Image (cartoon, rainbow, N blue to C red):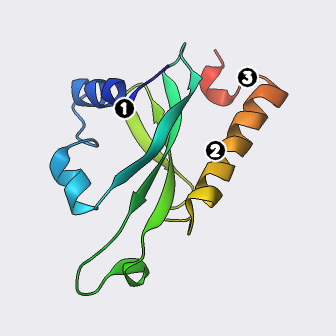
């Protein structure tokens, strides 16, 4: 099982700052639930974040939006678009679809050798 602490440590080890407190504060990021470990062999997990722009010219009219993230060996990427989902349920449905595909169709590209 991959934890947020594991991800942060590995992210810092490769010289990235995705989990930096200043970046999290800037984007008003929340980690929604625990990460879903997809592959411990290749260090892959999926998780949801939400962000809210509270500036004067706020994106998304100041509403909190949700993003699906994939973590792999220290790097974090967005699945789809940043802030693509209006609800947490939408975002978690995407993760469920990915996980279902993983178990139904076999090994995803990140586990292939």
Label 3: element kind: loop
Q: Earlier in the sequence, mark 2 or mark 1?
A: 1
List x then y, in percent, for residue 98. Answer: 69, 40
Q: Which residue, given by chain and number where applicable, does mark 3 sit on?
A: 107
Question: Farthest residue toward the left?
Answer: 22
| Gap between marks 1 and 3 measured at Cα | 24 Å
Residue under circle 2?
A: 95
Q: Which residue appears at 52% of the width and 18% of the height?
A: 42
**Is 79 placed left or right of 56 in the picture?**
right
Residue at (23, 80) in percent of width and height: 55
32 above or below 65? Answer: above
Q: Can residue 82 be seen by looking at this rendering?
A: no
Identify the mark at residue 109; answer none if there is no mark: none
Residue under label 1, please give it.
Answer: 4
Which one is closest to the eye, mark 1 or mark 3?
Answer: 1
Reply above or below: 60 against 28: below
Residue 46: horizontal and vertical position, in percent?
53, 37
């Amino acid at each position: 099982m991959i934890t947020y602490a594991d991800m942060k440590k590995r992210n810092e080890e490769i010289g990235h700052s995705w989990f930096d407190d200043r970046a999290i504060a800037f984007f008003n990021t929340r980690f929604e639930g625990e990460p879903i470990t997809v592959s411990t062999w290749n260090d892959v997990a999926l998780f949801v974040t939400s962000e809210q722009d509270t500036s004067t010219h706020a994106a998304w009219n100041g509403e909190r939006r949700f993003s699906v993230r994939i973590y792999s060996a220290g790097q974090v990427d967005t699945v789809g678009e940043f802030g693509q989902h209006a609800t947490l349920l939408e975002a978690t449905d995407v993760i469920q679809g990915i996980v279902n595909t993983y178990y139904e169709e076999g090994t995803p590209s990140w586990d292939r050798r």
